[in-house]
Image (cartoon, rainbow, N blue to C red):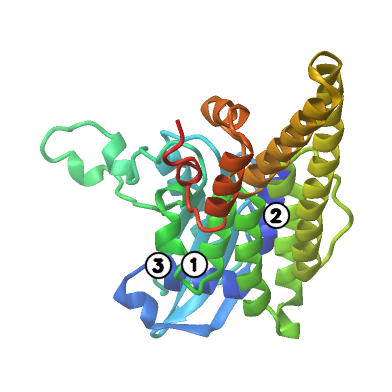
Amino acid sequence: MYEHDYSYKLLFSHAVMVEDLLRGFIPEVWVRELDFTTLEKVSGSFISDDLREREDDLIWRVRWQNEWLYVYILLEFQSTVDAFMAVRIMTYLGLLYQDLIKHQQLTARDSLPPVLPVVLYNGRTRWHAARNIRDLIPVVPNGLEKYCPKLEYLVLDEGAFSDSELAPLRNLVAALFRLEQSRTVTDIQQILIHLIEWLQIPEQAGLRRAFTVWLRRVILPKRWPQITLPEIHELQEMHTMLAETVQQWYAEAEEQGMQHGLQRGIQQGLQQGLQQGLQQGQLEGERLLFKFQLQAKFGPLSPKIEEQLDILNTEMLFHCAKRLLTATTIEEVFIDLP
């Protein structure tokens, strides 16, 4: 949890990430009127009257027409839906205004600046909590409703975006969401190619490192805990390391498959003849190598796919391997098989 929070905070400490978030995921006219050259990060630490400190959020401000628009990004790791997020948002917004007044950035003659509260959520279920605090308050008697607060926040529910929606976008936040949803090494490698291209200028070295840290400490250990990760500082190094890892998996699969198959073949050969045993051992090795190739492209295999693998003969393996080159789903690899 901590590593995810820290890594996200590091990523959204870069102005280009905030700009891509606003441009790519808020399709409203006023976003096009923002002067992104004025985008700057401000303090995100507040102390309320009961002395509880709040330091988790990132707050940016950007000029909209003649005034500042504050973009309040709530970067707590939300893996579950918080039914009372609207209450928290109202509290944080009050603390922001209180802080501006306390530090004399606002006077009695000034208006309060507009604020866009954004919640980044990457839980498995879709976000279904109330997005306006007014929706948490039941129907009240006529005349009392004018005293009820109204405040809405924006939720970016990462899992609600499909890969087909995100893939065409030249957008760093879209790439971040795609990496969150990635399941195979191949998926990550393809997205890395785009990030390396988009962040190649020297000024983006810090953001490249931030993506690398997040991948190394959060995404890869969660997907493949068995991988021993070296110290890596650049996206290009990460891409190279993943390519070498896949090659190593293939080599280990081939070696393990030949050894495992040979052992089984020798045992069967004692009963059915050495030649038949060696042939069976070779087939077992080919099946195991093909299994690792499937896992590298599609991720963990279902029990049904495991059963289909066990019945493949040499001819079936050959045809399935050819289909693997162009298949987009694992079911296409085994089409027409008994």
User: Would you identify the image quadrant in which residue 285 lies?
Assistant: top right
Q: Position of residue 163 (x, y in %)?
A: 45, 57
- The image shows residue 66, relative to residue 265, as above or below, that is below
Q: Quadrant of the C terminus?
A: top left
Residue placed most toward the observer, 105 or 293: 293
Label 3 SS? loop
Disc 3 versus disc 2: nearer the observer: 2
> Residue 293 location, x and y as percent?
67, 46
| Horizontal side of residue 176 vs 157, given as left or right | right
**Tally of numbered tags:** 3
For residue 242, what is the image quadrant? Answer: bottom right
Q: Residue at x 34, y 45 (%)?
A: 131
Q: Mark 2 vs mark 1: which is more N-terminal? A: 2
For badge 3, the amino acid type reads Pro
Which residue in the protein does label 1 denote? 21
Left or right of 72, for residue 219: right
* Tag 3 and tag 1, C-beta contact below 8 Å: no
Q: CA distance from mark 3 to mark 1?
A: 18 Å
Q: Residue pushed farthest left?
A: 142
Q: CA distance from mark 2 to mark 1?
A: 16 Å
Q: Hey, what amino acid is under mark 1? A: Leu
Q: In the image, residue 210 lies at what x, y percent?
A: 73, 63
For disc 2, the marked residue is: 7
Q: Mark 3 or mark 2: which comes first in sequence?
A: 2
